[in-house]
Image (cartoon, grey):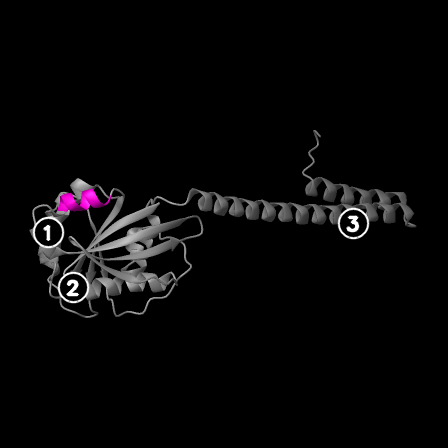
Amino acid sequence: MQNIVLLLYSDQELAIKLLQQIQSYYKIQSETNQIKQKIFEFNKNIVLKTKYYEADISFIGINYDNFQKEDTIDIIKTQYNNIQGVVFFVDAETLKGHNEFIELSDQLISELDPSLQVVIYNRKQDSQLNQALIEKEEQGLQTFIESVYFDLDEAVERKDTKMAQKVDDVLGFDRIIEILECNTWATDIKYQKQQVQEDLKEKVKEKENKQQKDLDYEGEDFANLLNEIMTIRQSNISHEERKIQAEKVINKLTEQYNISDSD
């Protein structure tokens, strides 16, 4: 099943560049299709593939200007019935698109009820921001929307790392990827089951190998103890010395196999 994510922007070129960064991260190729249908301006399909699932995501581009029309949200709801996410794109330095984001976010989130909702600020390194204004206006929103700051000119690389323990641990583009991969998408169940089964088989195999190594180790130790016993029996030593050596072997045996006096 295809998952729909609405990407709202004031600058189409920058919005497409963001999707190209995501596409580059997953090392996949997909065309950006100019659709010019009603309020929709382009779409880009990206297959988000992780170890456990594969999700087909279609990003639909909509310029903020289209929301000046009264029936825009109705058109969106009529055209798409599987809207899983809404991404607002804002230029952090000029604040282009910020007013539109503030005006639209509560209504869109309320009516579409997406599982993924985020505002991405394109921020150049060392740029001067009116952070106080941005935070004040965001605090006035009724719905929670996570803010991520990211410089589109930064080079991105795929990192095979575990998810962070806290949101604050990951910033920028890495956080965008984490948001995408942590969302609950409609996925290919067959692929998902196959990946889980393969992972389970691998874990079972690792456990069996470890158990076999432990058995081999214990068997070797036991054989060594038996060899010591035979050596004591065949050695030309006194009865008292043989008794002392035998007690040492017995102590080793009880320690190795956790044998108590009651046993």
Q: Which residues are magenta?
A: 73-80
Vertical relation: 175 (above or below) 2: below
**Does the magenta segment cover residue 78?**
yes
Circle 3 or circle 2, nearest the eye: 2
Circle 1 or circle 3, nearest the eye: 1
Magenta segment's dominant SS is: helix
- Residue 185's spot in the image, x, y percent? 34, 45
Label 1 sits on residue: 67
Which sits earlier in the primary sequence, circle 3 or circle 2?
2
Q: Residues within 10 Å of mark 2 (few under 14, many from 20)?
A: some
- Residue 201's spot in the image, x, y percent? 56, 45
- The amino acid beneath tag 1 is Phe
Examine the rendering and report whether any part of residue 117 can be seen.
no
- Label drawn at residue 224: 3
- The amino acid beneath tag 3 is Asn
Examine the rendering and report whether any part of residue 217 can be seen.
yes
Is 188 left, or right, of 32 in this rendering?
right
Q: Which quadrant of the figure contains the C terminus?
A: top right
